[in-house]
C-alpha cells in the first residue's frame, strides 16, 4: 500500500509498509492455524527494528473481550511511544454491513500519520482455504503518538 510521499518521509513510508506487511502475514497465519486470534501489537523501535510488543493482560479477567484487549494495548503502547517510531494494533473484527470478517490493522507513525486498514476475509468451509479480499485503507486519528 502506497501513501503519498508528501505526507511521510521515505523512512516512515518504509516503516508503515513493513509493519503492515508483517501484521497481515502474522494475522493470516494465526487465522489459518486456529481460525481466530486475540488482538496483538507490533512496534518499530527508534533504530528501525520491527518488534512484537508483549501485552500485559493482568487485570482484564480470565477471558477478556477483544475490545478490552485492544484498549489495554493502546494504553501500554502510549507508555513506550517515546522509544518507538511506529506502532500497529491488529484485531480480528466483524464487518456487519458486509457480512464478513476482517483483519483490522491500526497503524500509527510518529511523523503524524494514522491509518486503519481492513483486510476482509471469508472463513474456510470444511477445511478449505481462507478467501482474503482487497485491502481497504482509511485515515484515522492518532491515539499512540498524539
Image (cartoon, rainbow, N blue to C red):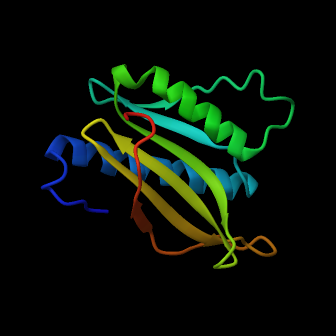
Residue placed furthest toward the bottom? 98
Q: Residue at x 70, y 78 (%)?
A: 99
Q: Which residue is drawn at 61% across and 71% down?
A: 121
Residue 139, percent from left and from top: 37, 59
The answer to whether 98 appears left or right of 104 in the picture is: right
Q: How far across and down, in percent of the image, does residue 94 sit?
A: 68, 65
Residue 109 placement: quadrant = top left
Quadrant in which the N terminus is drawn? bottom left
Residue 59 lies in quadrant: top right
Q: Nearer the viewer, residue 116 or 22?
A: 116
Q: Is residue 143 left or right of residue 82?
A: right
- Above or below: residue 107 compared with residue 100: above
Q: Residue at x 64, y 43 (%)?
A: 39
Find residue 95 and report its horizontal and vertical position in percent: 64, 70
> Which quadrant is home to the C terminus?
top left
Q: Which residue is located at x 74 percent, y 58 percent?
A: 35
- Rendering coords of residue 114 (x, y %): 37, 49
Front residue (pair 142, 33): 142
Amino acid at each position: 500500500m502506497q501513501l503519498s510521499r508528501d505526507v511521510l518521509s521515505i523512512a516512515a513510508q518504509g516503516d508503515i509498509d513493513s509493519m503492515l506487511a508483517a501484521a497481515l502475514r502474522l494475522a493470516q497465519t494465526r487465522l489459518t492455524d486456529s481460525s481466530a486470534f486475540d488482538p496483538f501489537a507490533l512496534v518499530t523501535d527508534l533504530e528501525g527494528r520491527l518488534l512484537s510488543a508483549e501485552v500485559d493482560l493482568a487485570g482484564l479477567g480470565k477471558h477478556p473481550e477483544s475490545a478490552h484487549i485492544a484498549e489495554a494495548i493502546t494504553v501500554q503502547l502510549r507508555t513506550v511511544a517515546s522509544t518507538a517510531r511506529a506502532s500497529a494494533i491488529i484485531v480480528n473484527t466483524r464487518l456487519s454491513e458486509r457480512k464478513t470478517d476482517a483483519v483490522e490493522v491500526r497503524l500509527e507513525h510518529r511523523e503524524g500519520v494514522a491509518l486503519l486498514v481492513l483486510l476482509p476475509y471469508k472463513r474456510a468451509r470444511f477445511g478449505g482455504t481462507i478467501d482474503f479480499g482487497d485491502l481497504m485503507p482509511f485515515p484515522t486519528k492518532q491515539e499512540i503518538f498524539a
